[in-house]
Image: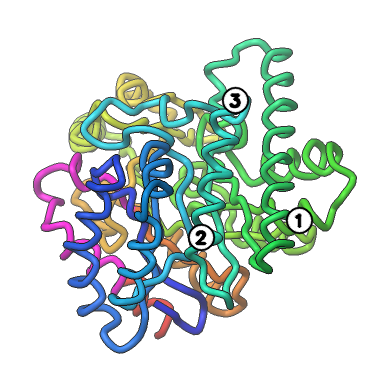
Amino acid sequence: MKLNSGHLTFCTNIYAGENWEAHFAVLKASFPILKAKLSPDSNMGIGLRLSNLASIEILENNHLSAFKQWLEDEGGYVFTMNGFPYGGFHHTRVKDQVHAPDWTTNDRVDYTLRLAEILSQLLPDDMDGGISTSPLSYKPWFTDAEAREIATINATANILKVAEGLQQIQEQTGKVIHLDIEPEPDGFLESGPEFIDWYENVLLSARNDEKLVKNHIRLCYDVCHFAIGYEPHTTIISELNDKGIKIGKIQISAALKAKLPESIADRTAVLEQLSRFDEPTYLHQVIARKNDGSLIRYPDLADALSEGEDPTIDELRAHFHVPIFVEDMGLIQSTQSDITEVLNLQKNNPFTAHLEVETYTWDVLPTDLKAPLNDSIIRELAWVKTLLEQ
C-alpha cells in the first residue's frame, strides 16, 4: 500500500508453496483477505518470493500473463522480490543452505536475471523495482583467507553481470531495477562497515562505471540483521547517504534479545526461555555482547546457549525473525525499538520507497506466539502503518 514514506508490503517467503502453482494458490486464497482489511480503497503491493523452480515455471505457458491479470483484477502490484532463498524454504532443513548456490556460481546469476525479467513485466511504469539477495556467500564455507578473497572477487564479478543485465532492461523498457545486497551475520558481508568497504574498494574498483553500479546495486537494510550486530542505524544510514550508496529496501524485521542477569538462577531462567527458539529449520546466528563492550559471534543458537552462563556476557541477540508487534516476551525481548528508530528516520527523511515486512518464522515459533497467518500479517502491517503515519 502507498504511504507518504513509501510502498509498504509483506514478503511472500512466509508461504510454503515452492512451485508456482502452489505459491499462486496460497496468494489467491490470502491476498484478497489482506487487502480488504488493510487497503480496501487502493491498490496493495506484494513482495514476491519465487524459488528457482517457481521462477522457471511462471515463465512457462501463460502463467505470467495470468498472474498479471489476477493482480489487475485484485488491485495488487509487485514492486520488490526476495531472491535470497534459492530452493526450499519451509518444511525442510534450510540452515546455511539458504546461501546456496552462492554468488560464485552461474546458477545464482541465472536465477537472479530470471527474477529481473519477471519483475520487469510486473513492475508498474511509475516505480523502480528491487530484488534482495544474499551477501555474496557464507563465511564458514571458506576458512582460508585466500580462498575467501578469490570467492569475493568471483562473486563480485557475477553481481556486475547482473548489473549489466539490469542496465539492458532499463534501456529496453525504461524500468529501473536494482539488486539489493542483504548483509546478515556470518555472510561475507555482515555489517554496515563490511558492506561499505566491499562496495567502495571491491565493487566500484571492479567496474569503471560508477553510475551503472550505484543505480543497480544497492543495500537491503534488514533491520533484524543490523540489530543483531548492535549497529548504530542513524550513523550507517547517514554514511551511506554521504557516499551516494542507495538503500533499495528496508526489510522490517525483529530479532530476539536477551539481557542476562548476574544471578545464576535468573540467568538460567532467561536461557531456558531463549532455548524455546532453538529449532532445526533456519540459521539462528547469535552475537553476544560482553560487559566490556566486545562482541562474540556464534554460528547458531545452540552454540550460544552452551556458553550462556559465562558471567562476562551481558546480552545475546539472535537471528530469529519474531513478530514485529511484540517487544516483551516475558524474560526475553525483541529488537522492536530498532525498527522504530529506522522507520522514524525513513518517515522524517525517506531514503527508499520500498518497505517490506519479513517475518517468515510463523511455522516454527513457540506455540504461545503463533496465531492464524492472515491475522498475523494484518497485525504486523497495521503496526507499521500506524508507526509511519502517527
Q: Which mark is residue 214?
A: 1
Position in image of residue 69 (x %, y %) = 35, 70
Dot 3, how many residues are within 10 Å of its Cα: few (below 14), some (14-19), or many (20+)?
A: some
Q: Secondary structure at mark 3?
A: loop
Q: Is residue 121 above or below residue 71?
A: above
- Circle 3: residue type: Thr
Q: Could you tell me which residue is drawn at 57 percent across and 75 percent down?
A: 125
Position in image of residue 57 (x %, y %) = 37, 43
Q: Which mark is residue 250?
A: 2
Q: Main secondary structure of the magenta part?
A: helix
Q: How far separated are the C-alphas under marks 2 and 3?
A: 26 Å
Tell me which segment is drawn in magenta: 359-382
Dot 2, how many residues are within 10 Å of its Cα: few (below 14), some (14-19), or many (20+)?
A: many
Q: Could you tell me which residue is drawn at 36 percent across and 75 percent down?
A: 72
Whichever of labels 2 and 3 marks the residue nearer the N terminus, that label is: 3
Residue position for label 3: 105
